[in-house]
Amino acid sequence: MSKKLKDAYTLSSREDTINLYKYWSKDYDKDFAVRNNYKSPQKVVKYFLKYSKQNDNPILDVGAGTGLIGEYLNNYAKLNIHAVDFSKEMLDQARKKGCYTKIINADLNHKLEIASNTYGAVLSSGTFTHGHLGSSVLNELLRIVKPGGLFVISIHQDIYVKSGFKKQFKVLGSKILNLINHRVKIYGKKKNQKTNDDKVIISTFRKNFSFAHQ
């Protein structure tokens, strides 16, 4: 595990987060995604394509970073995808890829300046992990998604119970439908390196069709 990835897993303050991703942004794709054969964004896209319907739009990429989800999804179809992330510098890299119709720089730990029932789908990879967003964010994401909207989000398996995601899904109860958890490896095989067996749980579900936020 690289030093920057170790730092990312131990973030403890807003300032630490800003500083890490400010300096990691320009070489994040090469230093982390390519170097580690990072597969989580591709697998989120895979499950989106499996479960999505024509009206699951626009799409919000939560914790979009440098735009890996947008980049992979753009290989299959030209869709209306918006990116939201805490790091302006990471979003600057995502903007260069031309995959997003809108870029939103916002702190996901606070209420977003987005109208209720706006999005048809939420995708996320690498955001619900060590030192990043907690399960309480699901309430705000549910608010901004249309009734019937699709969620495809990766949650690191080590925090799924510890950080309250399993409990939060139970609390949400009938507000969500068809919850399915897919356990997948984060990293692909790397030449001349031992395989990293880290896993995420990719949770797919829909906002209840009868549940609209006012």
Image (cartoon, rainbow, N blue to C red):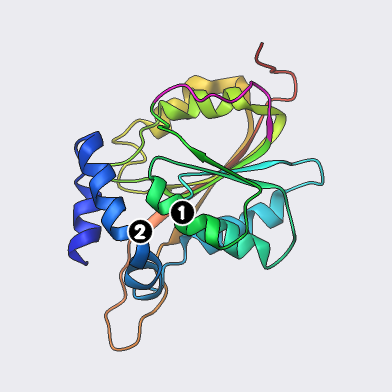
The residues bearing labels 2 and 1 have C-alpha atoms spaced at a distance of 8 Å
Identify the image quadrant of residue 213.
Answer: top right
Mark 2 falls on what kind of element?
helix
Q: Quick one: label 1, few (<14), some, or many (20+) residues within 10 Å?
A: some
State the image quarter where residue 58 is shown: top right
Q: Residue at x 59, y 22 (%)?
A: 143
Graded by Cα atoms within 10 Å as few (under 14), some (14 to 19) or many (20 or more), the crowding at tag 2 reads many
The answer to if 75 sits in the magenta stretch is: no
Q: Position of residue 160 (x, y in %)?
A: 37, 40
**Count of labels shown?**
2
Q: Position of residue 108 (x, y in %)?
A: 43, 32
Q: Secondary structure at mark 1?
A: helix
By secondary structure, the bulk of the magenta-drawn segment is best described as: loop
Above/below status of 170 relative to 90? above
- At horizontal 46% and vertical 50% (from top left) the residue drawn is 91
* Left or right: 178, with 78 as reference point: left
Q: For the residue marked with disc 2, what is the amino acid? A: Ser
Residue at 30%, 70% in the rendered image: 196
Q: Which callout, 2 or 1, points at the residue further toward the start of the chain?
A: 2
Q: Which residue is mark 1?
A: 92
x, y percent for residue 47:
62, 55
* Image position of 15 with respect to 49: above or below: above
Q: Residue at x 69, y 34 (%)?
A: 149
Image quadrant containing the C terminus: top right
Is residue 116 within the magenta segment?
yes
Reading the image, the residue beneath label 2 is 25
**Quarter of the image holding residue 150?**
top right
Quadrant, the N terminus:
bottom left
- Find residue 190 and report its horizontal and vertical position in percent: 36, 81
Give the magenta part as a residue range: 110-119
Question: In this rendering, would 105 be left or right of 97?
Answer: left
